[in-house]
Amino acid sequence: MYWYKKTPKSVLITGVMMLVFCAYGCKPDIKETGAALKYFDLKGFFSSETTRLNRLNKFVVKTVTHNGATQSKRIRIDNWVRELDLFIGSDINRPAWKDSYTTTVSGDFLIYRAKYAELKMHQMLIKKDNGKVKWVLIFNRTKNLLYQTYEKLSYFPDSLYTIEKDQRVRLMGRNSYTVKGMISR
């Protein structure tokens, strides 16, 4: 190989070292390591919910509103993981965030609040009854020089989910979205 003969050893060694460092940096999630989760297992909860909803294959009356214009359809959701992706993405059980949220338990309510303004998941409320989740409410926000996004995510097993999103993009203005899915019984 012509290029191999001309490549200095230092370049090859540097390349191998970069591969080793990249492989070392790809650590599994905390759940895969067997470590205990500090916060409610939101990712695991929605993983079981999406599996269950895919299996049940119920109709959903889905209403989407964008800046005041509304459309509704009665459909079957073929991929609940994609449908509830914003909920799954709000999981806070990452090693870097292990001390980033305050936890309050009050009766059947579990409340998480972000200690730092730069964290996306700002607040999460979970209502349980006899250990079973009755509803989940999540408030997310992202703010930087280019845009601000506020999300309110609500999930009621076997009945309803809503995604409310308000986005303000510099130079482009404001967009407001609402997705409401009423799950048939």
Image (cartoon, rainbow, N blue to C red):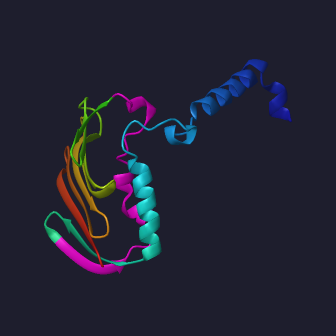
The reply to whether the magenta stretch includes residue 76 is yes
The reply to whether the magenta stretch includes residue 107 is no
Up-down relation of residue 108 to residue 15 (above or below): below
Q: In the rendering, at what x and y percent does residue 173 appear?
A: 16, 50
From the image, which quarter does the C terminus lie in? bottom left
Q: In the rendering, at what x and y percent does residue 130 appear?
A: 30, 55
Q: Residue furthest left?
A: 68
Residue 69 appears in the picture as rendered: yes
Up-down relation of residue 102 to residue 139 (above or below): above
Residue at point 78%, 20% (across, down): 9
Q: In the rendering, at what x and y percent does residue 161 appear?
A: 27, 64
Q: In the rendering, at what x and y percent does residue 153 appear?
A: 25, 55
For the residue pair 152 and 113, the one nearer the viewer reads as 113
For the residue pair 40 and 97, the one nearer the viewer reads as 40
Residue at point 67%, 31% (across, down): 19
Quarter of the image for residue 132 reads bottom left
Span of residues in magenta: 70-99
Quarter of the image for residue 134 reads bottom left
104 left or right of 24 in image: left
Residue at point 82%, 30% (across, down): 4
For the residue pair 9 and 1, the one nearer the viewer reads as 9
Q: Residue furthest front?
A: 130
15 left or right of 41 in image: right
Quarter of the image for residue 142 reads top left
Up-down relation of residue 34 to residue 165 (above or below): above
66 left or right of 40 in image: left
From the image, which quarter does the N terminus lie in? top right
Residue 79 appears in the picture as rendered: no
117 left or right of 44 in image: left
